[in-house]
Image (cartoon, rainbow, N blue to C red):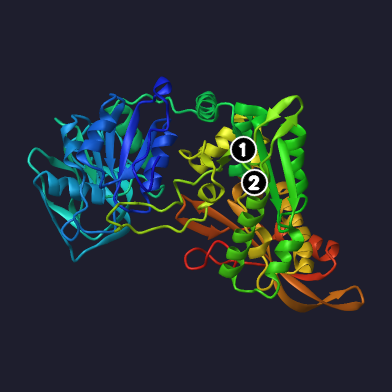
């Protein structure tokens, strides 16, 4: 999956999957379309909308392309020139337009799109018309008149006001008479609403109907089978050369390390930079897993004093991020220089094997769901901030880049990790930011603060894992998508027995998310909060008050910073 430019196909010809092409017009939810297609076990790629007709024809030449999806956009078709390449409509394969994708399809095929005084953002009920193949049998409820209705999520200002020749109305709302259109003879379909978001109740069924039913694509994109493909691809790319991987302890680098080690064994060396801002015992757990259980070569660099020294006196969160990220790169680069091939590089014998020195730098992943969306050459897309890369390192080190997870979403990375034998609780643990405790400590980062926070945070996570929700039978750790403790550099009066204390405050944070767009604070049971608070105050000397944060997103951020 390429997001900034058309890329090489991920799979070698010997293991080609049938595929869906998603053309990106710049909407943040484009990535969700791809996720939903992947959830149907269908391989897909996202490419910018401004690829050429020649590129489209070349892409389809192998016969594996079974359908095209045109994504949404923040723009208006009558104000910008972003449109689908004409070749898309010459391939003779099904096309699905979503939101802007519907509007550009209408505009390009002879219909009309206009702005509207009545916009639709949020929940809507859409009436289905015409018993089209796409919507047949898919409904949330029926009206007394027998009309099938869908509960959907709308996000548009413009709308199609005239159908292109050959199309009929597929669905409507009172304020949007053409909320969907279809040309069944050519298998062209388009909807004004967003089936990719979970707010559209039947969205998954609709997308599966398109890719599996109408396009007839094989559902063969399965992570356990992908291991063999990925291993083969890594071996073909690396050969007998050596690879360096920066191991952070996060899910991405961990899965990448396990996969690459499966492929090339001791040709891989992992460099684990311990910045002293990890969760409790996390560094030891990383070493135990990769060195102890996988028997991978891991160099652990204890750089905690260096990081804490550089962070002294710095309280602004973005500045802290930059310092931590920059130092990580510097330390990793210094270690990598000792291992790479070339002058002064790593050579010699290792267990009877000739060590030539590394020529590849491996990278965990750049998530398709958080990287800049719509990397069109026009640069009109709205971008999503991402820090999931080692920008510039390959060039700086003079190494080739190995990205075995580049085409995978976060959920797929996790599935792959479990299939590789990594512990479920490790792979499915809550995400933790690269800067670690550095952005969980408000204000200046001090060792004293980090040590207190680490212990308080560990208690919170432990009790979330222990406390079950009776209604679901799941633990509150599983019911939340992210939970952590935040250190507040203020002191508060407390009472311990007959004495007064004057110690620090921590705040607990837990959120539940849907898609990647919506987060809300988790309504943790009072009994759980009471247990956590009591344990932290009793067991962590230096903290005497615990609060619970109930800020939602929007308007608050997921992370405290």
| Label 2 Cα neighbours within 10 Å, binned few <14 / some 14-19 / many ≥20 | many
> Residue 171: percent from the left, percent from the top?
21, 44
Q: Give the mark nearer the N terminus: 2 vs 1.
A: 2
Residue reaching furthest to the top: 14
State the SS at label 2.
helix
In this picture, residue 82 sits left or right of residue 358? left
Residue at image mark 2: 336
**Is any part of residue 469 visible from this angle?**
no
> Residue 150: percent from the left, percent from the top?
30, 45
Q: Residue at x 77, y 35 (%)?
A: 292
Q: Nearer the viewer, residue 459 or 371?
A: 371
Circle on res. 358: 1
Q: Quadrant of residue 297?
A: top right
Q: Determine the CA span between mark 2 and mark 1.
A: 8 Å
Q: Quadrant of residue 434?
A: bottom right
Residue reaching furthest to the front: 343
Q: Residue at x 14, y 30 (%)?
A: 185
Q: Quadrant of the N terminus?
A: top left
> Considering only vertical position in the picture, is 374 above or below 494?
above
Q: Are marks 2 and 1 in contact (CB under 8 Å)?
A: yes
> Residue 373: percent from the left, percent from the top?
38, 52
In this picture, residue 559 sits left or right of residue 535? left
Q: Nearer the viewer, residue 45 or 336?
A: 336
State the SS at label 1.
strand
> Considering only vertical position in the picture, is 547 above or below 242?
below
| Label 1 Cα neighbours within 10 Å, binned few <14 / some 14-19 / many ≥20 | many
Q: Residue at x 68, y 35 (%)?
A: 423
**Is any part of residue 263 visible from this angle?**
yes
Q: Quadrant of the C terminus?
A: bottom right
């Amino acid at each position: 999956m390429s997001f900034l430019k058309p890329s090489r196909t991920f799979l070698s010809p010997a293991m080609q999957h049938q595929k869906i092409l998603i053309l990106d017009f710049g909407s943040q939810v484009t990535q969700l379309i791809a996720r939903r297609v992947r959830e149907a076990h269908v391989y897909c790629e996202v490419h910018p909308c401004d690829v050429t007709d020649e590129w489209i024809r070349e892409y389809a030449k192998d016969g594996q392309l079974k359908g095209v999806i045109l994504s949404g956009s923040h723009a208006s078709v009558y104000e910008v020139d972003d449109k689908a390449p004409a070749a898309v409509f010459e391939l003779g394969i099904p096309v699905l337009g979503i939101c802007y994708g519907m509007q550009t399809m209408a505009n390009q095929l002879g219909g009309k799109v206009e702005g509207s005084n009545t916009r639709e953002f949020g929940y809507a009920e859409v009436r289905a018309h015409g018993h089209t193949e796409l919507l047949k049998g898919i409904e949330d409820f029926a009206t007394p008149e027998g009309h099938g209705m869908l509960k959907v999520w709308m996000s548009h200002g413009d709308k199609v006001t005239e159908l292109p020749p050959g199309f009929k109305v597929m669905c409507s709302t009172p304020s949007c008479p053409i909320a969907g259109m279809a040309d069944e003879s050519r298998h062209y379909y388009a909807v004004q609403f967003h089936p990719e978001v979970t707010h559209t109740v039947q969205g998954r069924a609709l997308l599966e109907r398109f890719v599996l039913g109408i396009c007839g694509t094989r559902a063969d994109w399965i992570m356990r089978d992908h291991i063999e493909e990925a291993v083969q691809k890594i071996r073909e790319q690396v050969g007998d050369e050596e690879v360096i991987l920066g191991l952070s302890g996060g899910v991405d680098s961990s899965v990448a390390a396990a996969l690459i080690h499966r492929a090339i064994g001791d040709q891989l060396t992992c460099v684990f930079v311990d910045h002293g801002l990890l969760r409790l015992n996390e560094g030891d757990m990383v070493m135990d897993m990769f060195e102890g259980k996988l028997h991978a070569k891991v160099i652990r660099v204890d750089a905690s004093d260096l990081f804490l020294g550089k962070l002294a006196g710095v309280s602004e969160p973005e500045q802290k991020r930059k310092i931590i990220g920059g130092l990580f790169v510097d330390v990793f680069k210094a270690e990598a220089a000792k291992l790479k091939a070339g002058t002064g590089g790593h050579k010699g014998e290792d267990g009877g094997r000739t060590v030539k020195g590394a020529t590849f730098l491996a990278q965990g992943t750049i998530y398709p769901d958080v990287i800049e969306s719509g990397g069109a050459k026009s640069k009109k897309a709205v971008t999503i901030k991402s820090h999931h890369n080692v920008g510039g390192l390959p060039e700086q080190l003079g190494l080739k880049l190995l990205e075995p997870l580049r085409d995978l979403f976060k959920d797929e990375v996790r599935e792959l990790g479990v299939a590789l034998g990594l512990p479920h609780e490790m792979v499915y643990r809550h995400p933790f930011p690269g800067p670690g405790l550095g952005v969980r400590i408000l204000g200046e980062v001090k060792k004293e603060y980090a040590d207190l926070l680490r212990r308080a945070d560990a208690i919170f996570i432990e009790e979330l894992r222990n406390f079950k929700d009776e209604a679901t039978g799941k633990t509150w750790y599983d019911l939340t998508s992210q939970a952590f403790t935040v250190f507040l550099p203020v002191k508060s009066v407390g009472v311990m027995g007959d004495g007064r204390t004057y110690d620090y405050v921590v705040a607990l944070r837990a959120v539940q998310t849907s898609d990647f767009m919506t987060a809300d604070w988790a309504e943790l049971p009072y009994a759980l909060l009471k247990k956590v608070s009591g344990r932290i105050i009793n067991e962590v000397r230096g903290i005497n008050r615990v609060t619970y944060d109930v800020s939602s997103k929007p308007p608050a951020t997921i992370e405290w910073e």
